[in-house]
Amino acid sequence: MSVRTAVRTHPRTGKDHDFYIMDCPDWVNIMAITPDQHMVMVRQYRHGTDTVDLEIPGGVMDPGDACAVATGTRELREETGYEGEGARIIGAIAPNPAIMSNYCRTVLIENCTLMHPTSFDEGEDIETVLVPISTMDQMVRDGIVQHALVVTAFYHYRLR
């Protein structure tokens, strides 16, 4: 991530303003669904909120990744050991367009099964949890899932 300043001209007023912009790599979240209609989710510690959160697998696109689908497939395997089929993008959002330049894509991978051991990055300690899709809305309602980008991925899944 890098921070830069930019002068932007307001499209309506024509006035120039100085802004700080955070340039981050694009991110990917994965809706990984098992044949028996469970979501492959992860429980992990989040430094910013100092909480252990239930989320879906995801990560940053590495410079060598060919596309968001490749990143999603890689991240799912590394974080959970699961693989599936039919990987495709079902949504894209700008996480915070007021100050950030990146996008987050939701990749859907279906018929996921446990195929490999996990391969965590340094500092990662992730627990894989299988959760019925039917509980998705209630988990958001109850605050069990609080990550905004995960809630957005759930919404992209519902919209398909």
Image (cartoon, helix red, strand yellow):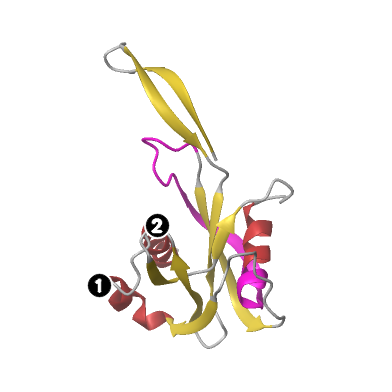
**Amino acid at pointer 1:** Arg
Task: Classify residue 76 by image quadrant.
Answer: bottom right
- Whether 72 is drawn above or below 25: the answer is below
Element carrying mark 2: loop
Residue 141, numbered circle: 1
Find residue 109 and report its horizontal and vertical position in percent: 59, 70
Using the image, determine if residue 125 lies above or below residue 149.
Answer: below
Spatial separation of the CA atoms under disc 1 and disc 2: 22 Å
Of mark 1 and mark 2, the one earlier in the sequence is 2
Residue 48, which numbered label?
Answer: 2
User: How dense is the environment of label 2, judged by Cα within 10 Å: few (below 14), some, or many (20 and up)?
Assistant: few
Query: Can residue 47 be seen by looking at this rendering?
Result: yes
For residue 107, say whether it is visible: no
Give the SS element for disc 1: helix
Q: Verify whether residue 89 appears in magenta.
A: yes
Query: Residue 68, image x and y in percent?
Result: 62, 53
Q: Is residue 91 magenta?
A: yes
Up-down relation of residue 131 to residue 125 (above or below)? below
Quadrant (top left/top right/bottom left/bottom right) for the C terminus: bottom left
- Range shown magenta: 76-101
- Residue 22 or 156: which is nearer the viewer? 22
